Structures are given as structure tokens and as C-alpha cells.
Image (spheres, grey):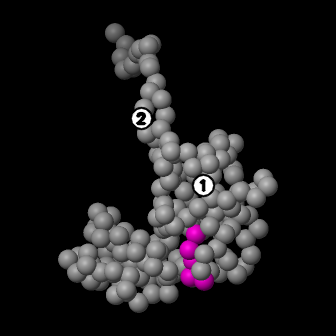
Amino acid sequence: MSCVTITLKLKFVNLNQAKAKIFGEMTQENTRLANWLLTIPLSERRKLTTAKVDTSLMSALANQTIRHTTSGVGKKVKQYKSLPPEINKQNWSIHKVGETYSVSFPTIKGTKRVPVAVASKHWQPILDRLLLGDTLIDKGSAKIIKHRNKWYAYISVTLEVPEVEGTTRIGCDRGRTI
């Protein structure tokens, strides 16, 4: 069995202005924290914990930002324009009430649960398997992203898929004429 990582793009449904404002504040605070962390030398940045950082973000979000700025990506960046908040796999969960799926995750004002729309029919079985606690699916991190004035949860999921046996060969046309 081989593993495939996919990203589920779940749009928040019926999002009120208060929650949208909270998500905007989270993005601003996360960007501010990441830019402040980039001013600190890398050797000291690795030693930082959420107790030593002054931020209004919950510790799970601040800790993920610290990890991001000390990783390979964070070493190369000089400054962030906008860094969306990222939630590690322990701190977000999927719920289903009736036919509506919702995602809960920590915010500035505590843990919020927001209903989401499933855009692709292929994602619904994956979400159902996540709800059942299927061991063949591994949750990844979730990002809260604003795209064209709409808020989304980008959730990465790793699936185990069977190996595909290829029996036929496909030729390659090089475009040469003799």
C-alpha cells in the first residue's frame, strides 16, 4: 500500500460577521507573531515556547507558528505579508449533525465549531471515514484561509491506496519525421 496526501478545501457555510472578524484577527496576529519571530536569531528561535511569546493566539496556534518559522520554510523567508493560521492534527476535529459537516478548532475567543460545505462528492466518504476514526486515514494540519472574501478550511489528509499494476506500455512521440 502506498500513501497519498490530499487537501480538502472546505468552504465555511453561513459564516456570520463575528466569526469572520475573529478569523481575520487570527490571521493578522499570526502574521505579526511570525514576523516578530523572524527578527530573532534562529538559534534562539528554536528555544522559544508559547510561554515566552506575547500573543493573543491560543497556545496551539502560537506553537504551530513557532514551528513554522523554525522549519526549512521559515529559514528562507525574510518577512510574511500574510500567514494564515495553521492548526495541527491534534487540535481540530470533524463533526456531523444531520447532513451538515462542521469543523472545530481553537481561535482567539476559544474553540469554535463552524459548518462547512463539501464541494466534491469524493470528499464526503473521506470525511465519513475521519468521523469513524479509520486507521487507514491520517489527519494532517488544517489552515484557515480567506480567498476572494470567502473563508475556507484547507485540511490535509493522508490516505493509504492500493498499488496500481500497469500492464500496458505507452509510447512517447518525439515529434521527429524521417
Judging depth in this view, the residue of 74 and 157 nearest the camera is 157
Q: Nearer the viewer, mark 1 or mark 2?
A: 2
User: In x, y percent, where is residue 16?
Assistant: 74, 75
Q: Is residue 50 above or below residue 15?
A: below
Does 12 sit left or right of 7 as displayed? Answer: right
Judging depth in this view, the residue of 136 and 14 nearest the camera is 136
| Residue at x-position 52% and y-position 77% | 27
Judging depth in this view, the residue of 48 and 71 nearest the camera is 48
Which of the 4 image quadrants contains residue 72? bottom left
Q: Circle 2 sits on which residue? A: 2
Q: Circle 1 sits on which residue? A: 9
* Figure quadrant of the C terminus: top left
Provide the secondary structure element on which disc 2 rests: strand
Amino acid carrying mark 2 in the image: Ser
User: In x, y percent, where is residue 133?
Assistant: 57, 49
* Figure quadrant of the N terminus: top left
Whether residue 26 is visible: yes
